[in-house]
Amino acid sequence: MECKENVIHYLSWGFIVGAVAYLLQQTRTQTPYGRYVTLDGTPGRTCPAKLAWFLQELPSFLVPMLLLLSTDTQPSLGKDLLLWTFCLHYFQRTFIYSLLTKGRPSPLYIVFSAVVFCSVNGFLQGHYMLHCATYDDAWQTDIRLGTGGMFEYVSGANFFGEILEWCGYALATWSLTTFSFALFTMCSIGPRAYHHHRYYQEKFEDYPRSRKAVIPFIL
C-alpha cells in the first residue's frame, strides 16, 4: 500500500483544529465522565467503566495491528520500534487498565465518541508509520529520543505522564501526524487535570498551595 499523503495531511490538521475546539469547550464546561458523571438512574444511557475503557481503547491497538499484519514492509528499526511503542501503550490500556479501573459508568455518547476517535487515530498513526515514515541509521542517536513521587508536584501526574509520553513520541517520530495526536491529548486531558486540581483545592482545606495542576512548578 502506498502512503496516502493527502489523507494523512488532512486528518492530522483535522485533529489539530479539533484539539483547539475541544480545549475551548473545556474552558466552559467539564466533560461528563469519571468523577464528573451525574447518574440519573437510567442505566441504558451509560456503560460500565471496565467495558467502556475496553471498547474505547481497543481500536487504537487493533487497527494498527491489523494494518501491520496485512502489510508487507521491509524491516526498519525506527518504524518498528515506534509503532510497537504505540501498540504496547494501547495494549496496556485495553487489556490491563480496563480490568483494573474502578471508575464510574461512562455516558454512551462519550464511549462512542472515543471509539470513533481511537479508530481514526489508530489508522492515522498505523498507516503513517508503516507506509509514510522513513528513518535512517542516525535516528537511533538523535537527541529527540531523550525525554523523560510526581503527585507531590502536580495534581494530575497521570495526565502529565501521558502528555509527556505522547509529546516524546511526537518528537521521536517528528511528523505532523503524531504532533496532531499529542496536541489533541494535551488539549483534552490538560483541562481535565485543572478541573481535578480545582476539585481537590475546594475539598481539602490543607491542600498544598505549591502543587500545580499538570505541569510541575508552572501550571
Image (cartoon, grey):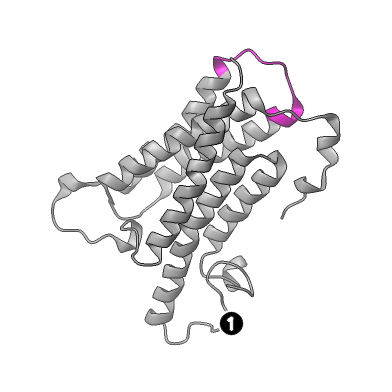
Q: Magenta span covers which residues?
A: 69-80
Q: How many other residues sit within 10 Å of disc 1, few (<14), some (14-19) or many (≥20)?
A: few
Q: Nearer the viewer, residue 207 or 1?
A: 1
**Quadrant location of the C terminus?**
bottom right
Residue 28 placement (x, y as % from top left): 35, 67
Viewer-closest of 116 and 54 = 116
Residue drawn where x is 44% and y is 38% of the image = 118
Q: Quadrant of residue 126?
A: top right
Left or right: residue 135 compared with residue 18: right
Vertical comparison of 15 with 24: above or below? above
Residue lying furthest bottom in this view?
205
Q: Residue furthest left?
A: 41
In reply to whether residue 92 is colored magenta, the answer given is: no
Closest to the observer, 26 or 140: 26
Q: From the viewer's perspective, tell me whether residue 191 is left or right of residue 180.
A: left
Counting from the top left corner in percent of width and height, residue 91 is at: 52, 36
The answer to whether 212 is drawn above or below residue 131 in the figure is below
Q: Is residue 40 above or below residue 175?
A: below
Q: Position of residue 165 (x, y in %)?
A: 62, 50
In this rendering, does residue 54 appear at all?
no
Residue drawn at (56%, 17%) of the image: 69
Amino acid type of disc 1? Ser
Using the rendered view, name the quadrant where residue 103 is placed.
Answer: bottom left
Which quarter shows the N terminus?
Answer: top right
Q: Is residue 140 visible?
A: yes
For the point 27% across and 45% down, which residue is it? Answer: 109
Which one is nearer the viewer's eye here, 12 or 82? 12
Q: Residue at x 76, y 45 (%)?
A: 145
| Residue 72 belongs to the span the image colors magenta | yes
- Residue position marked by numbered label 1 in the rendering: 210
The picture places residue 4, in percent across and down from the top left corner, at: 57, 23
Element type at mark 1: loop
